[in-house]
Amino acid sequence: MQSATSRTIGLNMGPSGRAIAQPMDVDLLEALYQHTSLERVSSAQYLAMSLWFLERELRGFSAFFKKESLSEQEHGFNFAKYIIARGQSVFLDEVTKPIQEWSNVEELITLSFQMEADVTSSVQQLYSMAERLNDTRTTVFLDPVIDEQIKAEDEMAYLLGKIKFANNDPSALLIIDNELNI
Ligand SMILES: [Fe+2]
């Protein structure tokens, strides 16, 4: 509810009644919702990957993907938190069913790398949209997100490189699994 005081000093209010310093463009807000969904879908996908490895006694890989799943969940939360900080309400979408079948480890890791690259593209699109709209608050919010995405891509590319090198050899995969089990 808008109070008498806020009316007199002309404060902008969001749907939740929070004061808004800078109104948010509707398309940018929609893009932020979509990105929040993408993070939540990635979290579910990584969870499915973690379980796939757990079923195959590869606990190192499983722990690695569980960590990834939790970190994507945290990213989704951070985007939602940012939307709220901008005085907007958060509307959560349905999380699509994750893929749960792969014919080998390389196929799974390839998908992980692709997912990270897709998340980065989505952040880049948000960034250029925010720049076009002179929404500096959003570009500042996105700066560390892009930094983290570059690191995530690097980590996934490194893992994919090792898996390709292992060429589905069980003993090589066990060595990588051990390395990831920390
Ligand atoms: Fe993420």
Image (tube, rainbow, N blue to C red):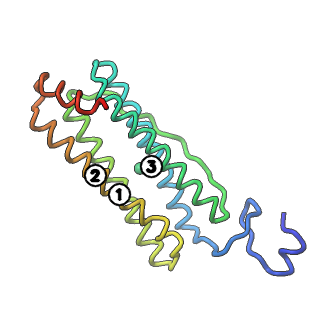
Left or right placement of residue 98 versus residue 114 in this view: right
Asked whether disc 2 touches disc 3, contact meaning CB atoms under 8 Å apart, the reply is no
Dot placed on the residue nearer the N-terminal end, 1 or 3: 3
Residue 87 rendering spot, x and y as whole percentages: 67, 64
Q: Which residue is mark 1?
A: 120
* Quadrant of the image containing the C terminus: top left
Q: Is mark 1 within 8 Å of ligand 1?
A: no
Res 112 → quadrant: top left
Q: Which element type, helix, strand or loop, lies under badge 2? A: helix
Q: Comparing marks 1 and 3, which lies closer to the viewer?
A: 1
- As drawn, 149 above or below 50: below
Q: Which residue is mark 3?
A: 38
Q: Comparing marks 2 and 3, which lies closer to the viewer?
A: 2
State the separation of the CA atoms marked 1 and 2.
Answer: 8 Å
Residue at left offset 73%, top offset 69%: 19
The mark found on residue 153 in the picture is 2
Amino acid tagged 2: Glu
Residue 60 rendering spot, x and y as whole percentages: 29, 28
